[in-house]
Amino acid sequence: MKTLLNRQHAFADDALLRRALCDHGLVFRTADGREYRRIERRPPTEATALLRHLKAGASGRAEVAT
């Protein structure tokens, strides 16, 4: 997980990022801290819309709001 996290952020503190993910209920950590597991949840409506917008921008096409 550490290598993956280090590639996805720019502030060079993977421990802080892992702690924040746990605090926000996005991942579960075992009592000994050896394993982290993502907690599957449906994203909020706003996040879904944002992800759709970002994906459309990345592909170079405009998306019409529905």
Image: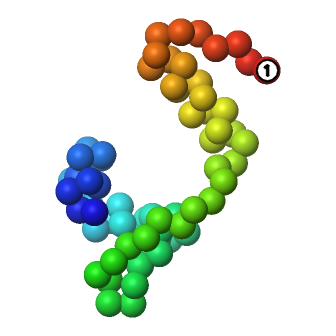
Q: Residue at x 44, y 20 (%)?
A: 58
Q: Eyeballing the image, is 53 above or below 8?
A: above
The answer to whether 56 appears left or right of 49 in the picture is left
Tag 1 secondary structure: loop
Rendered location of residue 44, percent (x, y): 69, 48
The answer to whether residue 43 is seen in the rendering is: yes
Rendered location of residue 41, percent (x, y): 62, 59
The answer to whether 47 appears left or right of 58 in the picture is right
Rendered location of residue 3, percent (x, y): 20, 56
Report crowding for label 1: few under 14, some 14 to 19, many 20 or more residues within 10 A (C-alpha). Answer: few
Q: Eyeballing the image, is 15 above or below 47?
A: below
Q: Residue at x 57, y 34 (%)?
A: 51
Amino acid at dot 1:
Thr
Q: Residue furthest bottom?
A: 31
Which sits in the foreground, 25 or 30?
Answer: 30
Quadrant for the N terminus in the image: bottom left
Q: Eyeballing the image, is 61 above or below 42?
A: above
Tag 1 residue = 66
Rendered location of residue 65, percent (x, y): 74, 18
The answer to whether 24 appears left or right of 8 in the picture is right
Residue 33, located in which quarter of the rendered image?
Answer: bottom left
Q: Residue at x 79, y 20 (%)?
A: 66
